[in-house]
Image (cartoon, rainbow, N blue to C red):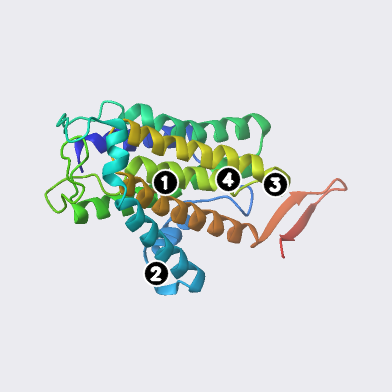
């Protein structure tokens, strides 16, 4: 892993420590068994894709291809045309990861203050989605080997040991933003989507503004993040539909067995 990417993992790791272990009192909460199951299903998901999944994949490939045609033009908006900075460092890596990490921590803090275990699980789901998207992104980076725009003026400089494609910041931000956007009550869904996708889009802009990524890098990272966020959110909701059996003291003495099941 390239040195500049450790900052993103570090910020997400700090967020995970702050979130702590989720409350396991509800059927929609997560544990290590859930994480292992999700990981297994995530990395074998293409074997079970339906037509809508393949359409999203195809659309993402097309969007990346279209963005590639504008890579030089967008780069020239934020850097002198025809000049490579060749800095070799990403001075704003931590700064650009803070918005996404703040969304995770903020969600957990609000849930803790309100005593909402579902909110804590939402924060945990953000971390799961970010982790899955980050692993996928790192594998793709290794395979692509694309050089960053601050080190070359050629957007077709692939397979030379670079780590530009896809953008890890964009991937993690959209994974976290998608979980936030697609969770909660439907009455406030538009607010969540504005905040979640807005935060992720702002992160993409910062990466382009800092001349750390080509436009197509951020589009590819965003697609990975959205897919990962949707995956983790869907699996959390599926767990919330499972039955829950609990034993509680009765006000008349003895105990009461309670069975709960959420159905469509």
Q: CA distance from mark 1 to mark 2?
A: 19 Å
| Residue 181 circle label | 4
| Residue 46 circle label | 2
Q: Judging from the image, what secondary structure is the residue with disc 1 in? A: helix
Residue appearing at x 21%, y 43% in the figure: 1
User: Are there few (<14), some (14-19), or many (20+) residues within 10 Å of tag 3?
Assistant: few
Pointers 4 and 1 in contact (CB under 8 A)?
Answer: no
Q: Is residue 12 above or below residue 25?
A: above
Q: CA distance from mark 4 to mark 1?
A: 14 Å
Residue 135 appears at what percent x and percent y? 32, 51
Asked whether residue 71 appears in the rendered view, the answer is yes
| Foreground disc of the pair 3, 4 | 4
Residue under label 3: 185
Q: Closer to the camera, 158 or 30? A: 158
Q: CA distance from mark 1 to mark 3?
A: 22 Å
Upstream in sequence: badge 4 or badge 2:
2
Q: Judging from the image, what secondary structure is the residue with disc 2 in? A: helix
């Amino acid at each position: 892993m390239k040195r500049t990417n450790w900052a993103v993992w570090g910020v997400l790791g700090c967020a995970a420590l702050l979130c702590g272990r989720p409350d396991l009192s509800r059927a929609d909460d997560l544990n290590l068994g859930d994480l292992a199951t999700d990981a297994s299903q995530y990395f074998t998901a293409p074997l079970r894709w339906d037509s809508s999944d393949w359409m999203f994949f195809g659309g993402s490939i097309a969007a990346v291809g279209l963005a590639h045609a504008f890579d030089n033009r967008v780069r020239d908006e934020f850097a002198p045309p025809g000049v490579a900075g060749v800095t070799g460092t990403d001075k704003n890596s931590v700064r650009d990861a803070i918005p996404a990490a703040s969304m995770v921590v903020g969600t957990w803090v609000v849930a803790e203050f309100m005593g909402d275990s579902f909110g804590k699980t939402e924060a945990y789901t953000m971390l799961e989605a970010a982790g899955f998207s980050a692993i996928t992104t790192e594998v793709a980076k290794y395979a692509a080997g694309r050089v960053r725009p601050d080190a070359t003026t050629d957007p077709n400089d692939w397979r030379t040991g670079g780590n530009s494609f896809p953008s890890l910041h964009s991937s993690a931000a959209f994974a976290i933003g998608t979980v936030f956007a697609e969770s909660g009550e439907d009455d406030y869904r538009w607010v969540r989507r504005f905040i979640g996708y807005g935060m992720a889009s702002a992160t993409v802009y910062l990466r382009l503004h800092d001349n750390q990524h080509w436009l197509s890098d951020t589009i590819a990272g965003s697609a990975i993040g959205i897919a990962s966020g949707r995956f983790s959110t869907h699996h959390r909701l599926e767990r919330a539909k499972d039955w829950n059996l609990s034993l509680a003291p009765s006000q008349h003495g003895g105990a009461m067995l309670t069975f709960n099941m959420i159905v469509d």
